[in-house]
Structures are given as C-alpha cells and as structure tokens.
C-alpha cells in the first residue's frame, strides 16, 4: 500500500455510464491469464452498468492507461441499474476467473475470459428474508478460506437468555463447469452444502447489559475468509452500545475488535448506514511499514496509537 492515486480518464457523452457496479482486479486475481496483467502493480477496473436495452461492461487497464475502445455487451442475464447499485450489493468478489455481485435474492456472475458471459444465480428459497425487518441487509458475499469456494454468509439475532448470540449460516457455490463455473448448468447454490452455527458474542463493556438489538454484516476479506459483523446491545440510559466483530468463516468463531473509535462503530452498526466497507489485507511487515514515515536518511520511523490496532 503506497498511497498512490490513479485518476482515470473521464467517460463522457455517449460513453458515460449510468448506474453501475465495479470490481478492481489485481495480479492476485489472475487465473489462466484472464486479467492479462503483466506487472504485480498493474490493475484492471471492470464496470457493469445498464445501457439502454442491455447490460454493458467496460474495463480500464493501468498498463494501457485507457478504457476499452468499445463497451461490451453482457450476455446471459440482464440486471437493472437500480438493482446493481443497492449499497449492500455493490461490493464485488473475484473468484476463479469470474467476478460476482449480490443482486437481491441472487448472485450475478460475470466471466472475465473475453466472452463477458453472465448468469443470474438464484439463492436457495429458504434464504429469502430470513432475518430482520424489510430492507435490512443480513447477507454478504465472501470466499471460504478452506477451499476458495464462493459463499454467502448470513447472520441474524439468536438471543438466548442473558447470553447474546448470533445465528450464522454459510451457503456455498458449486464449482463445476467452465471458467468461473459460470457456463455450467444446474443449481449453483446448494442449501444442503451449507454450514450453520450459533455463536456467542463477547460484550464490548459492562454497560452493555441487555439483549442484542441488531446484527448486520458490513464487509468481507477475500483471502482470509473474515467477515465483519456490526452489532448493537441494549445499554444503560436507554441508549445502544455498538461493537464490531471479525467472524472467521472457516472456524465459525467471532472475535471482538477493540480500539475502534465510538463514532465509527456507531455508523457501521446503523441499518441505514452507507458505511459498509471491503476488507483490505496485508501481511504484518507491510502493515507496519505503511504506518511509518521515512526520514532524510531513508530510515522508517514508526509510531502507533490506539487507532492503529483495529486491523486484523
């Protein structure tokens, strides 16, 4: 993480997209040369958007510093711009030569091998609005740390007596078929190949004495399989006490993340918040280096405060 910023050429006039979703592809996402990235620092930005009477796709390459000459037409499925840009669905996950987005009660899969073939894969019916009031997002796309399979993680309140608990379900995507499995026929999401558990949450403080009032997924880390869960408890004075947890999908354990400023936790826990985020992962050496500043002799000076500890 260098802090460098790339300003992309503007798409204007007839080339200007309407509502869109995007995915950032790096060399780590390359599979069978689908991203055509030669340098570890190179990247591609893929955008999918609603264009007149079809769903369009366009890509920017950092190596050519330009957008594709023409937009591609996504085949196999069409999704409205409104469905694409729901804030809870906007985060993309790249897995095995394809990029995926949540779209209502389905998953949109787009191949990156040049065909731009897409499919809309329905989730199991019994997963439809299982938890929470209408409009509350309880699911997030993730990648299993065990075998790299794409999965959907769902979390909801399962308060048991005085022990705050969440019910977590994970449904996995079958990987048979062509590149990314997108071309394969048949049901891709199998409710019988799911994982289920009830997890006890550690209360963030002694003031949080009451029941859980809300739980919602707020983002995922593709490599480690960690999913961020925001939760709120009844607290003294009639207020809510918020906390953020890291859910390990492989071990099915949730760990309280400490040291996060209260205003940030509160914004992430509100159902109507736009503060969802996508986890950025780095090794410890890279993380510590990112905190440091070079002096005139080229040495790295590192200072850390409480705000630096809410990493994973």
Image (cartoon, rainbow, N blue to C red):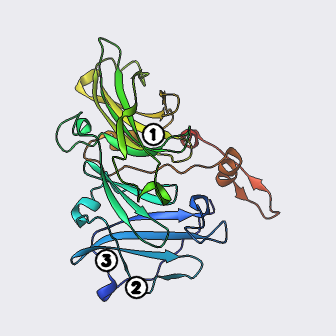
Q: Residue at x 58, y 43 (%)?
A: 308
In depth, the one of 94 and 33 nearer the eye is 33
Disc with the residue nearer the chain's start (1 vs 2): 2
In depth, the one of 239 and 168 nearer the eye is 168
Q: Residue 205: horizontal and vertical position, in percent?
A: 42, 22
Residue highlighted by disc 3 = 17
Q: Closer to us: mark 2 or mark 3?
A: 2
Residue highlighted by disc 2 = 70
Q: Residue at x 48, y 70 (%)?
A: 45
Q: Is residue 155 above or below residue 24?
A: above
Residue highlighted by disc 1 = 227
Of all residues shown, which one is farthest toward the left? Answer: 134
The residues bearing labels 1 and 2 have C-alpha atoms spaced at a distance of 36 Å
For the residue labelled by badge 1, is the local secondary structure a helix, a strand or a loop?
strand
Q: Name which quarter of the figure residue 235 lies in.
A: top left
Q: Closer to us: mark 1 or mark 2?
A: 2
In depth, the one of 133 and 251 nearer the eye is 251
The residues bearing labels 3 and 1 have C-alpha atoms spaced at a distance of 31 Å
For the residue labelled by badge 2, is the local secondary structure a helix, a strand or a loop?
loop
Counting labels gives 3
Give the side of residue 270 with respect to residue 228, left or right: left
Q: Name which quarter of the figure residue 18 lies in.
A: bottom left
Disc with the residue nearer the chain's start (2 vs 3): 3
Disc with the residue nearer the chain's start (3 vs 1): 3
**Label 3 neighbourhood size at 10 Å, few (<14), some (14-19), many (20+)?**
some
Q: Are marks 3 and 1 in contact (CB under 8 Å)?
A: no
**Quick one: quadrant of the C terminus?**
top right
Q: Residue 77: horizontal and vertical position, in percent?
A: 28, 64
Q: Residue at x 80, y 57 (%)?
A: 299
**Label 1 neighbourhood size at 10 Å, few (<14), some (14-19), many (20+)?**
many
């Amino acid at each position: 993480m260098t802090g460098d910023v790339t300003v992309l050429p503007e798409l204007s006039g007839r080339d200007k997209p309407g509502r869109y979703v995007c995915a950032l592809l790096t060399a780590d996402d390359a599979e069978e040369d689908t991203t055509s990235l030669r340098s570890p620092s190179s990247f591609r930005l893929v955008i999918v958007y609603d264009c007149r009477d079809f769903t369009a796709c366009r890509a920017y390459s950092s190596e050519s510093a330009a957008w594709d000459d023409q937009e591609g037409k996504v085949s196999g499925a069409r999704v409205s711009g409104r469905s694409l840009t729901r804030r809870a669905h906007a985060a993309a996950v790249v897995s095995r030569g394809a990029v995926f987005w949540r779209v209502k009660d389905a998953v949109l899969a787009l191949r990156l091998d040049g065909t731009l073939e897409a499919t809309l894969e329905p989730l199991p019916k019994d997963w439809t609005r299982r938890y929470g009031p209408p409009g509350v997002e309880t699911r997030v796309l993730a990648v299993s740390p065990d075998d790299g399979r794409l999965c959907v993680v769902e979390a909801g309140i399962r308060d048991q007596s005085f022990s705050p608990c969440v019910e977590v379900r994970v449904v996995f995507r079958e990987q048979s078929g062509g590149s990314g499995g997108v071309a394969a026929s048949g049901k891709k999401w199998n409710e019988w190949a799911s994982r289920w558990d009830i997890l006890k949450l550690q209360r963030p403080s002694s003031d949080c004495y009451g029941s859980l009032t809300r739980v919602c997924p707020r983002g995922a880390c593709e490599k480690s399989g960690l999913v961020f869960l925001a939760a709120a408890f009844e607290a003294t004075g009639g207020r809510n006490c918020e906390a953020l947890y890291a859910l390990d999908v492989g071990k099915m354990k949730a760990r309280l993340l400490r040291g996060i400023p209260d205003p940030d936790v509160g914004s992430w826990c509100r159902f109507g918040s736009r503060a969802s985020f996508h986890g950025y992962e780095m090794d410890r050496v890279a993380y510590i280096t990112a905190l440091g500043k070079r002096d005139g002799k080229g040495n790295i000076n590192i200072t850390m405060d409480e705000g630096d500890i809410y990493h994973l």
